[in-house]
Image (cartoon, helix red, strand yellow):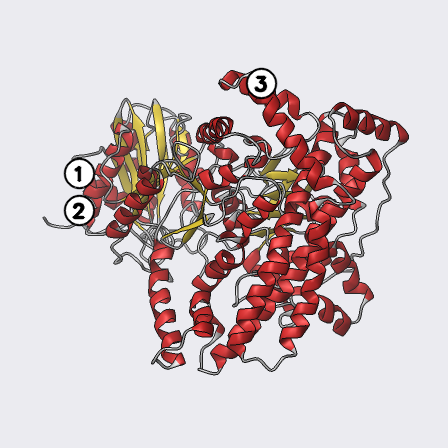
């Protein structure tokens, strides 16, 4: 086949129209600016003779659609121009030419086509991943009837579909047609990196534009063969989806946000050290020990986090099993797990808030109305009563202010600081120090933290229920948080009250990427994190429950058979939420010191932080108890090299946020997302993206960060107006923090919305109405 070359927008379409068989190109009239100035009357005559319906006048500049830059949307297109009014045609052409600016090239073109009618679907397809050029089709489309809603950005109905290029089992006829036409274009232009604009009318596919995706400054991973890896993953998911003798539930689901939500803490594509540390410290064993200790089913030996080609997923069946009170018999427990799995399958947009929307993991006011809905799913009244009683007893054991489980965990976390000093002041080798710090932080840090975090979740459920049963208003709910005295609030105020040395002695171990060795600690990046800071001491707004509110709470406590009183319950809520933040603050000192020692150890062998980020923590732990014939530097280099090469696959692979079936890894819709809105405020401000934080004054700005990692607490000392995160749940650190400080926020809006927000200039967050508006 003779290949065509991509040229100007109009010439590309004109040349393609006589070759392509899988799609149609609307007839067009194209001309250059210099020709139009000479033969204006003749060209307009030709347009009126050729077209009988209204037209669209489009740009075809030499600066568009070239290999270095697309300049997409840089120039005007004038739609729905009346073909019968000559002045309108001339005016539309003038507007397009004027949009090229004063430096317009006489060789720049303009072209005219008839407006396509009865559009049923329109959009854009990329024939490679836009960031890595890996082997995926990415289709953004709209079914509202507009022919340019996707490219213009004027739609709230945008859908995004990802399809692995070798996947053949596509059911939707339209998607099959789009991909067939794209493949033909790839062949015609001998180019696998295309950006194609399309629309359907009367079931016919029309192409409006074909251009090359710019490959400049891209991490080109197109040569990686993902087919074998994805097939292995497909088989792995099938195996994990079978019945398991030690697990309840007919199937499983995988998600990046349920339960210990790794997307929020370590990100979607963590490097090996961050992933292996998170697994070692929390999701391999520690998480299950905590659940067992707190009265839930024993899931010890079941790793919660599964790494699929380096992308961390939570095995939701294991998670759901672990939230079943252990006193329930297997019959009821099995029905509950299957009910939870079915509910999430039908409502996957709840994957980041399963405990609020899907499962019953504790008792709180108002739960009865929700729990009795189980009757509609085949549960008897007797079974529901047993579930209710088990949750009451489990909750009572946790919330007791004298002997509650969380109190013991708060006491245990205090021992960790002493343990840290014992190790750091010892004469142990670096390997030995790393080993014992990890053992100590698991026993005295992450395990009690997991318990306190469970208590804090229950505290949040009670607090939310106060609003639901109308004991307090949403405004009073905000005031309660502002009244809390958490570590995060202390940090914000201490920044102004303490000397730099005192401040860093106390908070210097924190870092924005808690598990990321390449992320600078506060004591390393002080000027970056705090350099452009306005005075912002947060005053504590006093709030107390009224006598009437306390009586209503007391009545509910008695009515619901809870072994507590109003003052004790309110104290539990306060101490549990504050305790969670404190416990996290303490155990991250240990974690930070572990990474300091890893860096020191690596430096002895000439290894940088960036290289050590690819090291598996198990490689270091094995050195404590295993001595083989290899030199240490060889062991480290082999592991780093292997994981570094593998990380290309981690970057190249695209997976959905929720996997229901094995086929989902080949074709999936991008999670729409909505986000968890914090406060009832409305703000309008300029947007600052994470990568630009150190370059701008953040005062009164809306800051966008990928994850709700607690290491970003320094942002609150910089007087930000609002916060948006890509990942994170309603119970995440940043959600609590923003509620406490009264900062309007959208936590966990999802990848698609996050991308649109960071690409904007000015946003309005209307938290009360749960809306984000792009203003410019």
Kindly indicate the quadrant of the structure image that contains residue 571: top right
What's the residue at 82%, 65% (across, down)?
Answer: 497
The front one of 225 and 86 is 225
Label 2: which residue?
Answer: 188
Kindly indicate the quadrant of the structure image that contains residue 490: bottom right
Q: Decide which of tag 3 and tag 2 comes sooner along the chain.
A: 2
For marks 1 and 3, give the one nearer the viewer: 3
Relative image position of residue 238 (x, y in whole percent): 31, 40
The secondary element bearing badge 3 is classed as helix
Confirm or deny contact between disc 1 and disc 2 (CB under 8 A). yes
From mark 1 to mark 3, how far is it between C-alphas? 67 Å
Label 1: which residue?
Answer: 20
Relative image position of residue 231 (x, y in whole percent): 26, 47
Label 3: which residue?
Answer: 382
For marks 3 and 2, give the one nearer the viewer: 3
What's the residue at 30%, 28% (across, down)?
Answer: 200
Q: In this view, does 618 lie to the left or right of 532?
A: left
């Amino acid at each position: 086949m003779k290949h065509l070359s991509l040229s100007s927008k109009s010439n590309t379409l004109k040349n393609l129209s006589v070759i392509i068989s899988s799609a149609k190109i609307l007839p067009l009239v194209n001309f250059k600016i210099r020709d139009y100035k000479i033969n204006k009357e003749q060209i307009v005559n030709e347009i009126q003779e050729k077209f009988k319906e209204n037209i669209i006048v489009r740009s075809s500049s030499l600066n568009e659609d070239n290999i270095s830059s697309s300049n997409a949307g840089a120039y005007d297109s004038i739609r729905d121009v009346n073909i019968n009014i000559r002045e309108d045609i001339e005016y539309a052409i003038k507007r397009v030419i004027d949009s090229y600016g004063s430096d317009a090239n006489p060789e720049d073109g303009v072209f005219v086509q008839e407006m396509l009618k009865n559009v049923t679907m329109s959009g854009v397809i990329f024939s490679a991943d836009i960031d890595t050029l890996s082997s995926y089709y990415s289709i953004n489309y709209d079914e509202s009837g507009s022919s340019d809603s996707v490219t213009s950005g004027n739609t709230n109905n945008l859908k995004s579909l990802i399809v692995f290029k070798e996947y053949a089992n596509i059911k939707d006829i339209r998607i099959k047609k789009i991909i067939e036409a794209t493949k033909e274009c790839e062949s015609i232009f001998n180019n696998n990196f295309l950006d194609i604009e399309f629309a359907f009318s009367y079931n016919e596919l029309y192409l409006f534009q074909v251009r090359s995706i710019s490959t400049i400054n891209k991490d080109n991973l197109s040569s990686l063969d993902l087919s074998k890896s994805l097939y292995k993953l497909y088989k792995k998911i099938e195996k994990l989806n079978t019945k398991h003798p030690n697990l309840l539930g007919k199937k499983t689901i995988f998600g990046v946000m349920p339960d210990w939500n790794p997307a929020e803490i370590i990100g979607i594509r963590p490097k090996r050290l961050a992933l292996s540390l998170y697994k070692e410290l929390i999701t391999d064993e520690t998480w299950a020990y905590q659940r067992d200790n707190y009265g839930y089913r024993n899931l010890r030996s079941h790793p919660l986090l599964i790494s699929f080609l380096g992308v961390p997923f939570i095995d939701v069946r294991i998670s759901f099993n672990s939230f079943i009170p252990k006193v329930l018999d297997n019959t009821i427990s099995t029905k509950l797990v299957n009910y939870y799995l079915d509910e999430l399958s039908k409502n996957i947009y709840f994957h980041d808030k399963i405990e609020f929307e899907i499962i019953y993991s504790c008792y709180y006011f108002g739960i009865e109305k929700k729990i009795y809905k189980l009757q509609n799913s085949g549960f008897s009244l007797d079974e529901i009563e047993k579930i209710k009683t088990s949750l009451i007893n489990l909750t009572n054991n946790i919330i007791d202010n004298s002997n509650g489980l969380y109190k013991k965990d708060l006491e245990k976390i205090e021992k960790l600081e002493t343990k840290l000093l014992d190790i750091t002041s010892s004469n142990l080798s670096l390997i030995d120090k790393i080993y014992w710090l990890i053992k100590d932080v698991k026993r005295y840090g992450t395990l009690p933290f997991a318990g306190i975090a469970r208590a804090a979740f229950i505290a949040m459920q009670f607090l939310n229920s106060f609003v639901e049963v109308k004991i307090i208003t949403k405004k009073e709910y905000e005031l309660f948080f502002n009244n809390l005295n958490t570590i995060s609030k202390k940090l914000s105020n201490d920044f102004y009250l303490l000397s730099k040395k005192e401040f860093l002695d106390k908070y210097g171990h924190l870092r924005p990427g808690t598990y990321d060795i390449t992320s600078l600690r506060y004591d390393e990046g002080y000027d970056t994190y705090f350099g452009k800071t306005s005075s912002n001491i947060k005053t504590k707004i006093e709030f107390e429950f009224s006598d009437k509110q306390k009586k209503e709470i007391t009545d509910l406590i008695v009515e619901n058979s809870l072994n507590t009183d109003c003052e004790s319950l309110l104290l539990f809520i306060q101490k549990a939420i504050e305790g969670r933040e404190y416990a996290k603050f303490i155990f991250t000192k240990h974690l930070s010191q572990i990474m300091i020692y890893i860096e020191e150890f690596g430096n002895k062998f000439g290894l940088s932080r960036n290289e050590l980020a690819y090291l598996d923590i198990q490689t270091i732990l094995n050195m404590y108890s295993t001595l083989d014939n290899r030199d240490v530097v060889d062991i480290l280099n082999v592991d780093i090299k292997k994981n570094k090469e593998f990380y290309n696959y981690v970057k190249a692979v695209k997976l959905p946020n929720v996997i229901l079936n094995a086929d989902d890894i080949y074709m999936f819709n991008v999670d729409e997302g909505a986000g968890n809105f914090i406060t009832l405020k409305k703000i309008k401000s300029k947007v600052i993206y994470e990568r630009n934080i150190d370059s701008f004054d953040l005062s009164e700005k809306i800051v966008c960060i990928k994850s709700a990692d607690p290491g970003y607490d320094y942002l609150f000392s910089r007087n930000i107006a609002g916060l948006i995160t890509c990942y994170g749940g309603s119970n995440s650190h940043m959600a609590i923090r923003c509620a406490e400080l009264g900062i309007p926020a959208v936590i966990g809006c999802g990848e698609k919305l996050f991308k649109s927000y960071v690409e904007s200039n000015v946003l309005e967050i209307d938290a009360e109405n749960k809306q984000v508006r792009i203003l410019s």
